[in-house]
Amino acid sequence: MAMHSLSPIALVRTLTQHRSLIRGLVVREVIGRYKGSVMGLMWSFFTPIMMLAVFTFVFSYVFNARWGVGTGSKTEFALVLFAGLMAFNLLAECCNRAPLLVTGNVGYVKKVVFPIDVLPVVSVVAGVFHFAVSFFVWFVFHLILIGMPPSTFLLTPLVILPLVLMTLGFSWVLASLGVYLRDVTQVVGSLTLVLLYLSPIFYPVSVMPEQYRSIMKMSPLTSTVEQMRGLMMWGHSFDWGLWAISMATGIAIAWLGFAWFQKTRRGFADVL
């Protein structure tokens, strides 16, 4: 039975050697999601626009919510909330789909020449595409409702990179576990819901009692969401030290997830 390298070099080689395949599968993934619908790819724009419009109405006019910092305008809370949800949706969408990536592509597993380790990569890159669409929608709404965001918002792609790497690592692990444990899909769905409320999506870390903040900081979303909002909404300076730690963590998780997938993939064909 073929042995698959677990080294970080093998991870980089997978991403570089199969980049054309990954690109083609991502295009098929994005377009295929809306295949047969009247609006087609425009749904990827319409959905976040509708979400942001609803958030703006509900939280600004129904609940009259305020974040407690910044301009204090009625629309600010919706934009702050949407910024956090963009990061959450990237992680949640990829992790919820990951357990079915291998089991849903049995034909690829049976083909020795097909690099099934790219399937989680395709899922994450597609998630990044939808994040980019939501980011563009956020920018347009901010421009219309508040004005030009601070120039630091341009650093958002850099801030989101560690989360992308962590999401990729989680996806490799979950894709593998989904082959052997079919209950993983339900477990992950519940955990992502818990993560939504234990991360600073609907509220800032500062409102959490001091004794519980350490728990919130364990969330893979906390540092990313907090720094994203600071850059996108209020022009905070970029925390290079925190970003370096997050990048190191993201790279480690991505490699460990890849190594786990490579180690366990040898039994996929037998189980499926």
Image (spheres, rainbow, N blue to C red):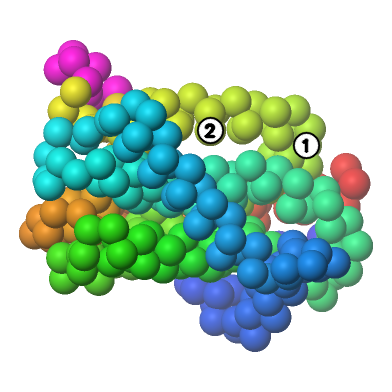
Residue positioned 28% across, 30% down in the render: 65
Q: Decide which of tag 1 and tag 2 comes sooner along the chain.
A: 1
Q: Residue at x 21, y 35 (%)?
A: 67
The answer to whether residue 216 is left or right of residue 18 is: left
Q: Is residue 62 visible?
A: yes
Q: Is residue 42 above or below residue 166?
A: below
Horizontal side, residue 223 vs residue 48: left or right: left
Q: Position of residue 260 (x, y in %)?
A: 59, 48
- Give the main secondary structure, helix, strand or loop, of the magenta stretch: helix
Question: Which class describes the residues within 10 Å of circle 1: few (<14), some (14-19), or many (20+)?
Answer: some
State the separation of the CA atoms marked 1 and 2.
20 Å
The residue where tag 2 is placed is 192
- In the rendered view of the protein, which quadrant contains the N terminus? bottom right
Residue designated by label 1: 180
Disc 1 marks a residue whose amino acid type is Tyr
Amino acid bearing label 2: Thr
- The residue segment tinted magenta is 208-215
